[in-house]
């Protein structure tokens, strides 16, 4: 119980401390850089329209109802924030010399209004047209340039009207505003850090203030607007963790090109807002900028530069951002050799550019596929010795006698027993039984059916012209009529590498070319022999540790790294590379060390004003709630 | 370097000309008023005041039938400050209870009398029925149409627009969420008003009626800012800014006529719209419009 009471007391004390420090009165510096003095003080009699005025020393250096202090700045003098704050409103669009009675900008011409940490506001009026350097919602530091001076709006000559009021609500009326000077008719304590002599310029020293009330003055606080009394700064970049947009990687400049609150140094989409940093395929590139968000491709290779990464581009070599694919076979129209017939493999036996799926004569032998007795071998003669409907060109046993052609001593005469009584190598069934010098078979069949100059008996492909007699796999069947050129057990028509022995038929990049014969297995545009990571798509060939093994497939240096404590300052292993973060050379945290800040630091969310609404609905009439009557 | 301790406080009278630049009537049209001076010095002073006085408004036939004028002399203002442009009323219909020497920000004739915006920022209606307070904390320039007066009120820059019905004595607040608002111009029938508001940090035209309908209208680079109210005539707005007088086509947001260096002159009783260019008065061939 005693412990609870103690804790409660401490909590209340802490709250009181916070509330008092957070609302500590803001003091101000001179709101301009030149040495000009005062031309008219604030009217401290607090009444407008009584025809009288007095300044903070009860003298007459003011005018009736003056709700601020006028400083006689020459045209073009630099105007600065008198204290740190946030821009609440601006007006720009009034001519530089308004003259007396000018109504522009609500009589104040071009102006900037700031709110400060104690709830007070300041206004800087009669500024130069187009000189305002800040925008609504922007945080400004004490002494930061706001613009230049002029004589816009109701003004009898170049000067700065500087107003101050205690609260956010209310107006700039004489009753809502306040004197800033200490004096017999002014304040009991000055709101200037150094108020200076009568009618002279105030001092230029900014208040040493602690905006977030964490006990560290703003000028030494590594997060002046976020409470962090411990000042923890994991990456040692001068920005405390609680306000660092990349707390795991040094980035003192806090560059955040897309303004999503995540610094470029650890943003997985530097140019696209993605506060959540979602990365579905976990390839280090955020979904919103990933050219293939569903498939890991850290290098983002995009050979045809159509915005779709190679690994998910249905035409990786032909630009087709729309990815149109009429037949739905996974191959885009612009590169599909059969646009209207599904053929993911894109087989084209006769290499005529028309896929087999839509080619009426796949082997281009002049016999339509529908009539061809050997569809994938050119056999214009359609020889079919055993009349089984399959052309000899497609068979290993032309006469269907159970003896393969390579071993058959009578190719086209069935003789399962292979009897060869005279031992001349020709079976009796096709021997020269009549002794006329022409074998029985030759007497039936013309000697060189395919007219390639090689007698059928000696031709390793008697049905197809093949003078070269090439036989890649040495199986005795010429390539011209071999169904499986590389003898790997996969028919040519289905083989991802028809001329390379490749039983596994693996195709890593899904390009229709098997890895066994693909010169670029991962499809990243780098040939295997030159690729530092041949089996992982990494077009950038990044190799942080210089070991010739690309980062994309290199072993991580700190296994298990990824916890929030990983990558603490000074814990980086030796040998890590230096990387530019846009401002400084910094130590790289790898993999899990690139933790994404959960808090983010988006720009201030501005209230949606009625004016903004009007902006969306220009020229659209709007009801304002009817007539309001009465005196003001 | 600009010396702020220069005797500006003692040389303020030099700034009278500046104060009067916006709508000073040419010397050729000014008239001398008052009874015969008692001494030569007094006569010179009165002549000086007469020369410096400006016309605020005039009617060929005033409330009592005769030609009536509202004239005032601008008060001196320090250089490099932003005091309001106050004037001392000289000529005014005395039968309406208006005292010569009253300090004013603006004054205009209305159907049954005069509205005077005093230096105390109180808007008053002077008529044969008496003096009635219309609004406090008000600012000009006043735009008048019949018995309606448009004015802004509040504290710069947070000025809001209101239209007073002098008959009922009630004011209607227009677009209460838009601030700052300036330079209102009533339509001839007093049912609508065009004004400028700082929209997204820049001056922009809006049109509103007395029922609460509000619309944004096309805006060019020029908007009214002079201490004389713009004149709304049909599909045109005639106004003065720092560069001169502009005839602005409301539908196309285009400038029909740009009279550089010109000043928009107050009503002189003729009903004609007049401008002054290089010291010469020129009629624009336009008539009507609320003033």
Image (cartoon, coloured by chain):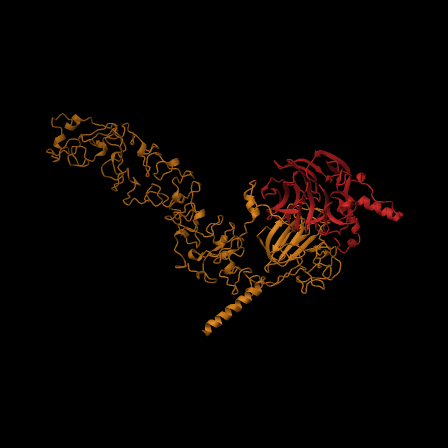
Chain colours: A orange, B red
Residue at 65% across, 54% down: A172
Question: Is residue A540 something one can see in this rendering?
Answer: no
Q: Position of residue A327 (x, y in %)?
A: 35, 36
Residue at 12% across, 32% down: A428
Name the image quarter holding residue A450: top left
Q: Position of residue B93 (x, y in %)?
A: 77, 44
Front position in the image: B256 or A499: B256
Point out the residue furthest to the bottom here: A2
Q: Position of residue A205 (x, y in %)?
A: 65, 61
Q: Position of residue A105 (x, y in %)?
A: 65, 47
Point out the residue furthest to the front here: B129
Question: Is residue A7 something one can see in this rendering?
Answer: yes
Front position in the image: A127 or A174: A174
Residue at 36% across, 48% down: A535
Quadrant showing the N terminus of chain A: bottom left
Point out the residue furthest to the left here: A421
Name the image quarter holding residue A24: bottom right
A225 on left or right of A452 = right
Front position in the image: A280 or A249: A280
A493 on left or right of A630 = left
């Amino acid at each position: 119980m005693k412990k609870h009471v103690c804790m409660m007391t401490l909590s209340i004390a802490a709250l009181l401390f916070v509330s008092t420090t957070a609302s500590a009165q803001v003091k101000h510096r001179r709101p301009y850089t030149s040495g000009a003095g005062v031309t008219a003080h604030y009217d401290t009699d607090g009444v407008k329209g009584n025809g009288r005025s007095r300044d903070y020393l009860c003298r007459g250096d003011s005018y009736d109802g003056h709700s601020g202090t006028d400083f006689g700045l020459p045209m073009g003098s630099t105007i600065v924030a008198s204290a740190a704050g946030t821009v609440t409103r601006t007006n720009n669009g009034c001519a530089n010399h308004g003259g007396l009675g000018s109504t522009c900008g609500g009589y104040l011409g071009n102006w900037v209004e700031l709110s400060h940490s104690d709830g007070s506001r300041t206004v800087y009026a009669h500024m130069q047209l187009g000189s305002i350097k800040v925008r609504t919602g922007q945080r400004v530091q004490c002494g930061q340039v706001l613009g230049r001076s002029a004589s816009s709006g109701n003004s009898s000559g170049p000067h700065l009207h500087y107003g101050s009021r205690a609260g956010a609500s209310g107006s700039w009326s004489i009753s809502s505003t306040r004197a800033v000077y200490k004096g017999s008719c002014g304040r009991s304590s000055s709101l200037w850090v150094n108020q200076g002599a009568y009618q002279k310029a105030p001092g230029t020293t900014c208040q040493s203030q602690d905006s977030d009330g964490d006990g560290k003055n703003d000028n030494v606080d590594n997060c002046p607007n976020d409470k962090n009394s411990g000042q923890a700064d994991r990456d040692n970049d001068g920005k405390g963790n609680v306000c660092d947009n990349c707390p795991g990687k040094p980035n003192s400049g806090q560059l955040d090109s897309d303004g999503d609150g995540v610094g470029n140094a650890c943003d997985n989409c530097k140019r696209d807002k993605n506060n959540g940093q979602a990365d579905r395929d976990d390839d280090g590139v955020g979904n919103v900028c990933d050219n293939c968000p569903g498939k890991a491709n850290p290098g983002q290779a995009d050979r045809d530069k159509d915005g779709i990464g190679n690994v998910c581009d249905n035409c990786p070599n032909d630009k087709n951002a729309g990815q149109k694919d009429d037949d739905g076979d996974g191959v885009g129209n612009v590169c599909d050799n059969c646009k209207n017939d599904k053929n993911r493999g894109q087989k084209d036996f006769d290499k005529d550019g028309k896929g087999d799926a839509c080619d009426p004569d796949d082997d281009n032998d002049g016999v339509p596929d529908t009539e061809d007795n050997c569809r994938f071998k050119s056999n214009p003669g359609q020889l079919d010795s055993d009349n089984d409907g399959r052309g000899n060109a497609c068979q290993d046993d032309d006469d269907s006698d159970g003896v393969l052609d390579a071993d058959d001593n009578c190719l086209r005469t069935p003789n399962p027993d292979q009897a060869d009584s005279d031992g001349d190598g020709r079976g009796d069934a096709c021997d020269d039984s009549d002794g006329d010098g022409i074998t029985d078979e030759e007497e039936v069949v013309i000697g060189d059916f395919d007219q390639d100059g090689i007698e059928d008996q000696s031709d390793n492909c008697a049905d197809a012209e093949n003078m070269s007699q090439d036989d890649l796999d040495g199986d005795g069947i010429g390539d011209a009529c071999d169904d499986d050129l590389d003898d790997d057990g996969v028919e040519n028509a289905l083989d991802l590498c028809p001329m390379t022995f490749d039983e596994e038929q693996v195709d890593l990049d899904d390009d229709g070319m098997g890895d066994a014969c693909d010169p670029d297995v991962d499809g990243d545009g780098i040939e295997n022999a030159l690729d530092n990571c041949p089996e992982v798509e990494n077009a950038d060939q990044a190799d942080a540790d210089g070991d010739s093994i690309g980062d994309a497939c290199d072993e991580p240096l700190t296994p298990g790294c990824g916890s929030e404590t990983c990558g603490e300052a000074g814990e980086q292993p030796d040998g890590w590379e230096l990387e530019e973060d846009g401002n400084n050379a910094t130590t790289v945290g790898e993999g899990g060390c690139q933790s994404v800040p959960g808090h983010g630091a988006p720009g201030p969310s501005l209230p949606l004003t009625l004016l903004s609404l009007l902006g969306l609905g220009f020229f659209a009439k709007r009801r304002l709630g009817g007539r309001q009557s009465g005196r003001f | 370097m600009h010396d702020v301790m220069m005797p500006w406080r003692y040389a303020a009278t030099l700034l009278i000309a500046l104060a009067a630049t916006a709508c000073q009537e040419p010397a050729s049209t000014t008239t001398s008023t008052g009874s015969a001076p008692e001494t030569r010095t007094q006569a010179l002073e009165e002549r000086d005041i007469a020369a410096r006085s400006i016309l605020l408004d005039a009617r060929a036939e005033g409330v009592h039938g005769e030609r009536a004028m509202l004239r005032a002399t601008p008060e001196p203002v320090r250089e490099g400050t932003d005091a309001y442009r106050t004037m001392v009323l000289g000529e005014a219909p005395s039968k309406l209870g208006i005292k010569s020497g009253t300090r004013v920000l603006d004054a205009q004739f209305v159907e049954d009398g005069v509205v005077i915006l005093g230096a105390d920022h109180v808007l008053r209606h002077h008529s044969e029925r008496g003096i009635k307070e219309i609004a406090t904390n008000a600012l000009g320039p006043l735009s008048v149409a019949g018995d309606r007066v448009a004015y802004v009120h509040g504290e710069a820059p947070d000025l809001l627009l209101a239209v007073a019905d002098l008959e009922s004595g009630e004011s209607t607040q227009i677009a209460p969420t838009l601030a700052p608002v300036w330079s209102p111009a009533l339509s001839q029938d007093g049912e609508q008003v065009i004004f400028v508001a700082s929209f997204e940090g820049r001056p922009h035209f809006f049109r509103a009626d007395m029922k609460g309908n509000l619309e944004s209208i096309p805006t060019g680079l020029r908007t009214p800012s002079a201490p004389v109210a713009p004149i709304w005539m049909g599909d045109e707005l005639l106004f003065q800014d720092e560069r001169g007088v502009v005839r602005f086509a409301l539908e196309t947001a285009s400038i029909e006529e740009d009279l550089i260096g010109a000043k928009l002159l107050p009503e002189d009783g003729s009903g004609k719209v007049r401008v002054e260019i290089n010291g010469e008065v020129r009629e624009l061939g336009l008539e009507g419009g609320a003033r």
